[in-house]
Image: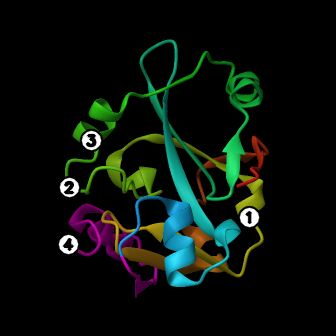
Amino acid sequence: MSISTRVGAYLDAQSIRYDIVNHAHSDSSLGAAISAKILPERIAKGVMLEDHEGHHWMAVLPANHKIHLHELQGQLSADLHLIDEAQVYQMFSDCDPGAVPAVAQAYNINAIYDEALANLDDIYLEGGDHETLIHLTGDQFGKLMKDTRHSRFSGAAFH
């Protein structure tokens, strides 16, 4: 499949420079890190949430982190819960199931990213399938996230 057409068009329209990294099939962002030989803290995953008013949010955090939902709820002053998989598949119909690109802007979804991603030299995002990553320099990631809220809302998970 390669990267989502919608994501590629958005990145191009915003003049965000990126590279494509192909890897063996994986079923998760951690699996993609292993397959592509990239440190998991450099892969940004998108977790889809819904607030008490029905607004959708994408929380962007490192692949090896776990979201602290209670902390994020306090920061956003919202009651949040995970969106069920069937709804996520509908929202990202141009992507393979389970391969959500952490580019909420391309889908007009509210986003917040974890500050653990803020100072990395290189960041990788799911491309929309299970065999492609989008590589951004730290500067290009900053450009992508320039108008996006950020805070600390995750911590390293042990696998």
Say if mark 4 contacts mark 2, CB within 8 Å.
Answer: no
Magenta span covers which residues? 1-24
> In the rendered view, would you say 135 is above or below 89?
below
For badge 4, the amino acid type reads: Met
Q: Earlier in the sequence, mark 4 or mark 2?
A: 4
Mark 2 or mark 1, which has the lower sequence index? 2
Give the image quarter of residue 20: bottom left
Q: CA distance from mark 4 to mark 3?
A: 16 Å
Task: Name the residue that disc number 4 marks.
Answer: 1
Q: Which mark is residue 118?
A: 1
Q: Residues within 10 Å of mark 3 (few under 14, many from 20)?
A: some
The CA span between labels 2 and 1 is 28 Å
- What mark, if any, has residue 89 been given in the picture? 3
> Which amino acid does the dot numbered 2 rest on?
Asp
Q: Which element is circle 4 on?
A: loop
Local packing at callout 4 (Cα closer than 10 Å; few below 14, some 14-19, many 20+) is few
Above/below status of 148 relative to 73: below
Nearest to N terminus: mark 3 or mark 2: 3
Spatial CA span between label 3 and label 2? 9 Å
Label 2: how many residues lie within 10 Å, few (<14), some (14-19) or many (20+)? some
Closest to the observer, 118 or 15:
118
Label pair 2/1, CB-CB below 8 angstroms: no
Foreground disc of the pair 4, 2: 4
Mark 4 touches mark 3? (CB < 8 Å): no
Q: Are marks 3 and 2 in contact (CB under 8 Å)?
A: no
Q: Horizontally, is 101 left or right of 123 in the view? A: left
